[in-house]
Image (tube, rainbow, N blue to C red):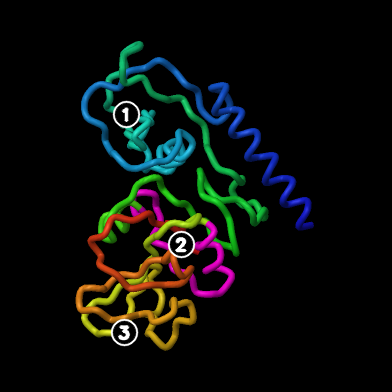
Amino acid sequence: MALLNLFICLFVIFILRENLAEGGGAFRRESITFTGAAATTALATSELTCAVKCEAAASGLCKGFTHHTNGTCELYNTAATLLPGGANAGMRSFRKIHLAADGSTVSCACPGDFSRCAGRCLIRPPQELGFTEAKAACVSLGAHLAVPRSAEENQCVLTMAAGVDAWIGLSEHGEDGVFVAEDGGEPMTTVDIPFWGAGEPNSAITYNCVQIWSVSKGWDDTSCSEQKAFICQLQA
C-alpha cells in the first residue's frame, strides 16, 4: 500500500507540473493584465504555490494571479479589470489545485513546493531574514517556523538547511531557558531539548532566538536580528 501511495503521489505531482508548464489542466496561462491594486500580496516560491494560494482564497477574492521572479504572489479579485497583454500578465481560469484530491488517503502529498519528511511538510524559502521577518514570511505561506520535536524531525530540518545557519521556531519571551514554540505546542525548556550544540544555549542576554547552527549541526541561541535562512513547516 505504501508503494502504491508513493506511485500515486509521484504521478499526481508529475501531472500537475506538466499542466503548469503547458498552461492546461490545473490552470491556464493567459496574457492578461490585472489593473488596479492586487487584493492580496504574499510570498510564493513558484507559480504552483501562488496558484494554491489563489485556489484557497475565499470565494470571489481571487480570479487570477501573477507570480513574479522575486517571489511575490499577487492575487486579483473578481472586481479586477482584465486587459489583454501587458507587463503584468498573469494566470487565470484555473481549476482546483491540490497534490491529492479531497478525501484522498494518500499520505505523502504536500502542497506547492513543500517537501514531506518525517510526516511534516517543510520548505526553505530563498530569502535570508531576521527572526521576526522569517516568522512573517512563513505565515504568508500558510505555515510557521519549523519546530522539530523528534530526532527524525530535527534531521529533516538539518537536511533542509543544507549546511547553512537557519532559523527554527523557538524563542525566549521573558523567562530565561523557556522557549516559546511557533507551532502553538507546549514551550520547550533548556532541559527538554536534546538537540543543543556543545556549550549551548549560552544564554547571553540578547540571544533569544534559536537557529540550526551549521558549525555544530545543533541548536544555538543567538541574536534575533541576524539575517539567516529559515525553515517553514505546515501545521500538522
**Disc 3 residue crowd, few under 14, some 14–19, many 20+, Cα 10 Å:** some
Task: Write the residue at 41% across / 66% down.
Answer: 213
**Residue bearing mark 3:** 177
Residue named by callout 1? 78
Residue at horizontal 55 percent and vertical 62 percent from the top: 156
Percent x, y of residue 23: 53, 22
Identified at 51% across, 56% down, the residue is 160
Please rate how many residues cluster around mark 2, counting C-alpha atoms within 10 Å: few if below 14, some from 14 to 19, many from 20.
some
Residue ranking furthest to the top: 84
In-image side of 136 versus 150 (left or right): left
State which tag comes first along the sequence, 1 or 2. Answer: 1
Q: Position of residue 198 (x, y in %)?
A: 44, 80
What residue is disc 2 on? 235
Q: CA distance from mark 1 to mark 3?
A: 49 Å
Asked whether the residues under the numbered discs 1 and 2 touch, taking CB atoms below 8 Å apart as contact, a structural biologist would say no
Nearer to us in this view, 36 or 129: 129
- Say what secondary structure mark 3 lies in: loop
Between tags 1 and 3, which lies in front?
Answer: 3
Q: Are marks 1 and 3 in contact (CB under 8 Å)?
A: no
Amino acid type, label 3: Gly
170 in the magenta segment: no
- Residue 127: x %, y % from top left: 35, 46
Under tag 1, what secondary structure?
A: loop
Q: Is residue 131 above or below residue 37?
A: below
Residue type at numbered disc 1? Thr
Q: Provide the residue span drawn in magenta.
A: 138-159
Whole-Å distance between the Cαs marked 3 and 2?
25 Å
Select label 1 or label 2 by which is in front.
2
Point out the frontmost of discs 3 and 2: 3
139 in magenta: yes
Task: Give, as a three-letter code, the residue at label 2.
Answer: Gln
